């Protein structure tokens, strides 16, 4: 397994926390199509804009999105590096699971042959 330093682990924790909510996952899915203004991202959700902005702050704290001001608009985009970091963490564990499952499968096949 890869060694993650405490700073990286903290970012991973914040990233998974951000993804734990349905609304925030929907925002990530929308941003896969391209950047968007915060007001545009908020439209599909039945909540006040200040409540929605809290979701954006969690996504930003988790490093999953980047926001910038353009005039009166807040423009949001995905941070691909953060998504890759979370994916890398999952992939490291998946490799271990696949190895264990492969060994277990071999044991069962060996037992069937005897």
Image (tube, rainbow, N blue to C red):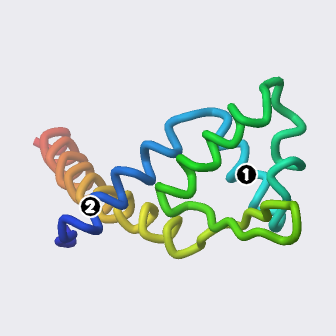
Q: Residues within 10 Å of mark 2 (few under 14, many from 20)?
A: some
User: Which residue position is annotated with label 1?
Assistant: 29
Mark toward the viewer: 1 or 2: 2
Could you give the CA–CA distance between mark 1 and mark 2, rounded to whole angstroms?
Answer: 24 Å
The location of residue 10, given as percent across then percent down, is 29, 58
Total count of labels = 2
**Mark 1 residue element:** helix
Task: Name the N-terminal-most of marks 1 and 2.
Answer: 2
Q: Classify the position of the N terminus by image quarter.
A: bottom left
User: Which residue position is annotated with label 2?
Assistant: 9
The location of residue 86, given as percent across then percent down, is 43, 61
Question: On the picture, is 28 further left or further right than 48?
Answer: left
Question: On the picture, is 75 further left or further right than 89?
Answer: right
Q: In which quarter of the view is residue 71 placed?
A: bottom right
**Mark 2 residue element:** helix
Q: Please report the residue visible at 77 percent of the width from the left and 69 percent of the height from the top.
A: 69
Q: Please report the residue visible at 89 percent of the width from the left and 38 percent of the height from the top.
A: 43
Residue furthest toward the front?
72
The location of residue 51, given as percent across then percent down, is 68, 31
């Amino acid at each position: 397994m890869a060694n993650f330093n405490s700073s990286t682990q903290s970012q991973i924790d914040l990233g998974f926390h951000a993804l734990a909510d349905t609304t925030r996952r929907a925002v990530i899915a929308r941003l896969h199509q391209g950047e968007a203004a915060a007001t545009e991202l908020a439209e599909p959700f039945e909540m006040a804009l200040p409540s929605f902005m809290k979701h954006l702050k969690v996504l930003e704290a988790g490093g999953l999105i980047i926001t910038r001001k353009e005039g009166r608009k807040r423009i949001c985009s995905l941070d691909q590096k953060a998504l890759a970091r979370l994916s890398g963490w999952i992939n490291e564990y998946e490799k271990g699971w696949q190895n264990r499952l492969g060994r277990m499968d071999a044991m069962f096949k060996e037992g069937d042959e005897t």
